[in-house]
Image: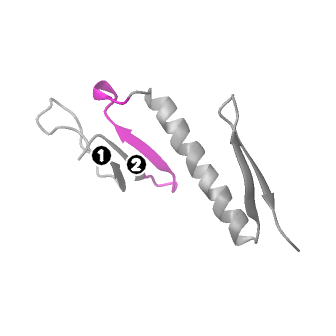
Amino acid sequence: MLENPLDHEHKQWNVDVAVGDDIGFRLNKEGVYELVTDLQTWKQPIPPERFLDKVTQQYARMTVHNTVAEDGWQVAEEWEMDDNSIELTVTRWV
């Protein structure tokens, strides 16, 4: 699905989540999503490792947001630091 069927010896993969025509994610046997792409034809403005780092970071960020909301907390402040880490301040009235 992600690679051109006319290309020479490129294996095609079914993915669970597609991002455009050339990037996708599939759920492996361990229940972990894996990036599926053709590194030889990568056309994104950032390297694939950085792309995967940012996707992982945003997934973790949204997981924290959802978890604190489920527990009755509210995100009061959020910052992206110079080292690309994210800091959150959460509050809850009791």
- Tell me if mark 1 has few (under 14), some (14-19) or many (20+) residues whose alpha carbon lies within 10 angstroms of its own: few
User: What is the distance, in whole Å, between disc 1 and disc 2 at their CAs?
Assistant: 11 Å
| Residue positioned 17% across, 37% down in the render | 4
Residue toward you, 6 or 75: 75
Is 5 placed above or below 47 here?
below
User: Which image quarter: residue 90?
Assistant: bottom right
Left/right placement of residue 42 relative to residue 78 reads left
Residue 16: where, in percent of width, then height? Answer: 36, 56
Judging from the image, what secondary structure is the residue with disc 2 in? strand
Single out the mark in the foreground, 1 or 2. 1
| Residue positioned 46% across, 55% down in the render | 29
User: Which image quarter: residue 82?
Assistant: top right
| Residue positioned 65% across, 33% down in the render | 84
Image: magenta residue range: 27-44
Q: Earlier along the polypeptide chain: callout 1 or callout 2?
A: 1
- Look at label 2 and name its amino acid: Phe
Is 9 placed above or below 16 here?
above
Left/right placement of residue 63 relative to residue 24 reads right
Furthest-front residue in this view: 76
Judging from the image, what secondary structure is the residue with disc 1 in? loop
Q: Quadrant of the C terminus?
A: bottom right
Residue 77: where, in percent of width, then height? Answer: 74, 51
- Look at label 1 and name its amino acid: Gly
Residue 83: where, in percent of width, then height? Answer: 69, 29
Q: Which residue is mark 2?
A: 25
Residue 59: where, in percent of width, then height? Answer: 56, 51
> Quick check: is 28 in the magenta stretch?
yes
| Residue positioned 70% across, 34% down in the render | 81
> Quick check: is 30 in the magenta stretch?
yes
Q: Which residue is mark 1?
A: 20
Left/right placement of residue 20 relative to residue 9 reads right
